Amino acid sequence: MAEPAYSFTLPSLEDNLTLECRIYHPESITASSDDGSAGVRGATLAHPYAPLGGCLDDPVVLSLTETLLGEGYIVGTFNFR
């Protein structure tokens, strides 16, 4: 399982709760593609509906994170609550 490169929290705009965030990046980040154009790609993943059990560590979110990292994406995930 991949470990996040950065973990941090953001304050909620509505109340005093904090939102947990993680940034993952592949082992090697290529700044340009073969043709010389910018090649950094990224994705933000949101977990399933929290009141029904969805969270930052949801197996689907973690699986998608691993898949996207394998394809060279930088991935951001966060907990709604």
Image (cartoon, rainbow, N blue to C red):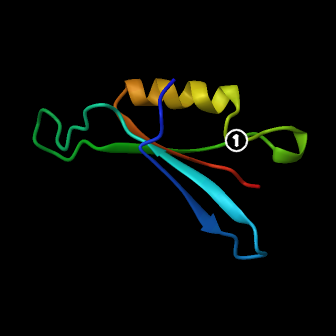
66 and 8: which one is in front?
Answer: 8
- Left or right of 28 in this view: 20: right
All told, the count of numbered labels is 1
70 and 17: which one is in front?
Answer: 17
Residue lying furthest right in this view? Answer: 52
- Left or right of 29 in this view: 49: right
- Residue that carries the numbered disc 1 in the rendered image: 47
Residue 25 picture quarter: top left
Q: Position of residue 26 (x, y in %)?
A: 35, 33
Quadrant for the C terminus, please: bottom right
Q: Position of residue 74 (x, y in %)?
A: 39, 41
Residue plotted at (63% across, 54% down)? 20
Q: Position of residue 60 (x, y in %)?
A: 66, 27
Residue plotted at (51% across, 23% down)? 1
Mark 1: few/some/many CA within 10 Å (<14, 14-19, 20+): some
SS type, badge 1: loop
16 and 60: which one is in front?
Answer: 16
Q: Position of residue 52 (x, y in %)?
A: 89, 39
In this rendering, the answer to whether 13 lies above or below 41 is below
In this rendering, the answer to whether 74 lies above or below 79 is above
Residue plotted at (12% across, 32% down)? 34
Residue plotted at (70% across, 70% down)? 12
In this rendering, the answer to whether 20 lies above or below 28 is below
Residue 32 picture quarter: top left
- Left or right of 39 in this view: 46: right
Amino acid found under the numbered disc labelled 1: His
- Left or right of 33 in this view: 69: right
